[in-house]
Amino acid sequence: MTTTHSQRWTQNSPFIAGTAATEALFADALVAADFGRGPQDDLAVGERFGTVGRYRRAGEFHVLFGTPTGLRAKGGQLWTLNTPGVHGRARTNRWFGGVGCAGDFGRSGRFDLVETEADQPPHNSYGPGAVQILYGSARGLSGVGVQLWREGEHGIPGTRTSSDLFGSPFACG
């Protein structure tokens, strides 16, 4: 075993967007897949307790793109509930950024990302949860056509209640 060519990433690494915070839980969820921009796998790094603007624990996730020499943060992507195309708005305790898994769910032949969150509220309720699918493209993940899935909608059985946490924790097989 060798550490030659190893990489270490933190919220304070160069070109990692967002604001470093002790409680942010940078890399509490990781998903590797080819979201686009080349044949190498990329890395989605979840940070469910990340601060977005003035909102603590709103959540975010980062995409580091794979290159022939390893992952690269420069030119990476930062996703929050305020990113165009993503459903919802950043606010305290949303816990967006629970990256769950990747798979080719259609559209481009690239991998797509399943993101989970604890709080996608109807009428300010707390904790029913939601799942969003962001599709891969030649430029990486795209905000175009993001799908939102919640309990009791689109044929998913059940009724949304304040403590369901639908989709969280999320496991892919």
Image (cartoon, rainbow, N blue to C red):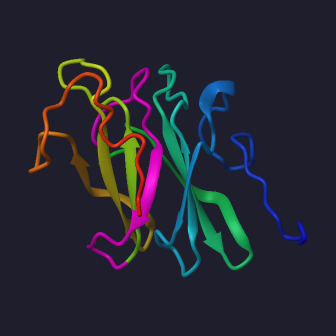
Quarter occupied by the N terminus:
bottom right
Q: Residue furthest left?
A: 155
Q: How many marks?
A: 0
Residue 89, magenta (yes or no): yes
Q: Is residue 170 magenta?
A: no
Residue 71 drawn at (x, y percent): 68, 65
Quadrant of the frame with the C terminus:
bottom left
Residue 145, image x, y percentages: 24, 58
Q: Residue at x 28, y 30 (%)?
A: 164
Question: Taking 143 as reference, is 156 left or right?
Answer: left
Query: Which is the main secondary structure of the residues drawn in magenta?
Result: loop
Q: Residue, x 32% and y 76% (percent of image)?
A: 108
Q: Residue 50 falls in which quadrant of the image? A: top right
Q: Magenta residues, as a range?
A: 86-109
The quadrant in which residue 83 appears is top left
Residue 91 drawn above or below residue 46: above
The vertical placement of 18 against 30, above or below, is above
Q: Position of residue 12 (x, y in %)?
A: 74, 40
In this view, the residue in front, 126 or 20, is: 126
Q: Position of residue 41 (x, y in %)?
A: 57, 72
Give left or right: position of 119 versus 49: left
Query: In front: 157, or 2?
Result: 157
The quarter of the displayed image where residue 17 is located: top right
Residue beneath the point at 37% across and 32% down: 118
Decide if residue 56 is on the left or right side of residue 172.
right
